Amino acid sequence: MMIKQYLFRFLVLLGISFCITNSYAEKNQIVMQGTYNSVNIQAGYIVANDMKFSVDNATRVYDSSGQLRSLKSLKPGQQLNMHYRNYGRPVKNVSEMVLDKIIYYSK
């Protein structure tokens, strides 16, 4: 009986912490949309809507079917959704340190 109570409490606390973590991650994200123009990987940015967006070797790029691609697979005119996430504190702008950069593009 005691084991069931402890197991139940553990599962409840685990569920609560999971919900808090998910809601926290959503608040620490900026999503930007734009039409892709060009890339300068050496300088660490791509250009979309005539604005520079930070990228690095860890930036993940996915096509519309969800396949992982490289930054070099981007072509001018593609619609981009850029997700910048910071797990340390809320993100106010992309010039802040961002740990996770994900780009989704349409064909």
Image (spheres, rainbow, N blue to C red):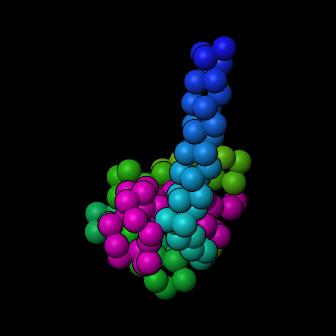
| Whole-percent x, y for residue 23 in the image | 59, 58
Give whichever of 22, 57 is nearer the camera. 22
Residue 2 vertical position relative to residue 32 in the rendered view, above or below: above
Instruction: Tell me where the magenta segment starts and ends, as one range.
Output: 78-107
**Quarter occupied by the C terminus:** bottom right
Give whichever of 70, 95 is nearer the camera. 95
Q: Is 93 contained in the magenta span?
A: yes
Residue 69 vertical position relative to residue 45 in the rendered view, above or below: above
Q: Is 35 contained in the magenta span?
A: no
Residue at 68% from the left image edge and 61% from the top image edge:
106
**Residue located farthest toward the left when viewing the structure as drawn:** 43
| Residue 26 falls in image quadrant | bottom right
| Residue 18 falls in image quadrant | top right
| Whole-percent x, y for residue 69 in the image | 53, 48
**Quarter occupied by the N terminus:** top right
Give whichever of 95, 7 is nearer the camera. 7
Residue at 57% from the left image edge and 30% from the top image edge:
10
Say how many tags the image has: 0
| Whole-percent x, y for residue 67 in the image | 62, 44
In screen coordinates, is 33 left or right of 52?
right
Residue 66 vertical position relative to residue 89 in the rendered view, above or below: above
**Residue located farthest toward the front when viewing the structure as drawn:** 2
Residue at 28% from the left image edge and 63% from the top image edge:
42
